[in-house]
Image (cartoon, rainbow, N blue to C red):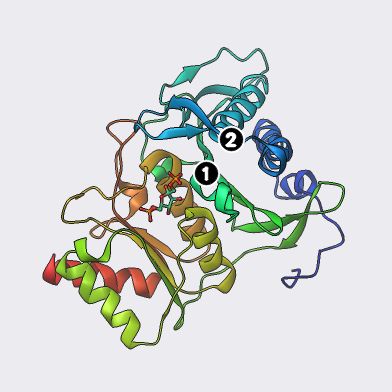
Amino acid sequence: MAERGQTKFQIDLRRHLREQAVDRNLTRLITEIAEASKYIINSIRTGDLGVAGTSNLYGEQQLALDVLADRILEKRLKYSGVVASLVSEESGDILRFHPEQEGPYYSVAYDPLDGSSLVDVNLAVGTIVSIYAGDNLLQPGRQQVAALYILYGPRTTLMYSTGNGVHEFAMNQLMEYSLVQEHVRIDGGSGIYSPGGQRNLYTPGTEAFVRSLEERGYKLRYSGGFVPDINQVMIKGKGVFLYPHLQNRPRGKLRLLYELNPMAFLVEQAGGAASDGHRPILDLVPQKIDDCAPVFIGCREDVAAAEACIAAQG
Ligand code: AFP
């Protein structure tokens, strides 16, 4: 297994998926998304930061980059020949296709550029993708067959799992994704915490949990971008991210289909946990495509401590 930092004999993403005996159509789907990221990188590096003038279903002004990244991914997925339906955080409607290719087909929920409001202050952003077999997107996250994220930071990295561990890749000078490390693990220990949402709106249980972390010497690390903040927990192998239920926002902020389910799949595959404060994120049954949920995600012991504080104090 490659130690982090060494590229293992330049194993690229397609070869790794083949070696993992991933289904041919799922391999095609994941590599199409990886290809799309090259165009998203280009739009981030050179794109217009002006507001696109449209808004997504949450009423947020769509930056030109949101729209651009969404179009890039939608086009790639539509013409991949293996996607039966897709839904994007930007579009809000489920698009259905009739792929000509031989099955199996997949359905994809994605956030094309999560944290897009951070681009104009030059902070890291990412693409988050959740993949199901068949054409039903309103399934519990535990039914996902794969999940991945791409982090556009000082380096562009990709983290994926098809249910056999989580594997990290870095984009090289030729814009290919080369394997950096296999079987990323979150083993715990005193680490970092990423407290999303306004602290003064935390419930007593969440407040008690955060105070316990600080008393144990955890350091606050919060960028405002879900992908870089989760990636930090994955690579450091410890710590916890939370965007909890707030006094004025009992469902929290993060979206179940596009953000929480894929990240919960990856984190659980890395030996961590993801909870809404009471139960695993992956067991939540989505009612609508824009469902939100509170989230405590990262080291298994830290997530269990959060659940205990919330059970005791709400
Ligand atoms: P945007 O995509 O609207 O920038 O929101 C990013 C995000 O969904 C997620 O990436 C962050 O973890 C979270 O919101 C940050 O929310 P706050 O700005 O309320 O801290």
**Image vertical order of residue 80 relative to residue 185, above or below:** above
Numbered label attached to residue 116: 1
Q: Which residue is mark 2?
A: 65
Q: Secondary structure at mark 1?
A: helix
Q: How many marks?
A: 2
Q: Amino acid at mark 1?
A: Ser
Give the side of residue 153 with respect to residue 241, left or right: right
The N terminus, quarter of image? bottom right
What crowding class fits label 1: few (fewer than 14 Cα within 10 Å), some (14-19), or many (20 or more)? Answer: many
Residue 273: % across, % down: 40, 63
Label 2, label 1: how far apart the Cα atoms are? 7 Å
Q: Amino acid at mark 2?
A: Leu
**Image vertical order of residue 51 relative to residue 144, above or below:** above
Determine the residue positioned at 46% across, 79% down.
191
Q: Earlier in the sequence, mark 2 or mark 1?
A: 2
The quarter of the picture where residue 154 lies is bottom right
Q: Secondary structure at mark 2?
A: helix
Q: Are marks 2 and 1 in contact (CB under 8 Å)?
A: yes
Which residue is nearer to you in this view: 23 or 293? 293
Which residue is nearer to you in this view: 134 or 30? 30
What crowding class fits label 2: few (fewer than 14 Cα within 10 Å), some (14-19), or many (20 or more)? Answer: many
Determine the residue positioned at 82% across, 63% down.
8
Give the side of residue 3 with respect to residue 280, left or right: right
Asked if one can make out residue 77 in the rendered structure from this viewpoint, the answer is yes
Asked if one can make out residue 202 in the rendered structure from this viewpoint, the answer is no
Which residue is nearer to you in this view: 96 or 125? 125
Residue 41: % across, % down: 70, 42
Determine the residue positioned at 64% across, 22% down.
75
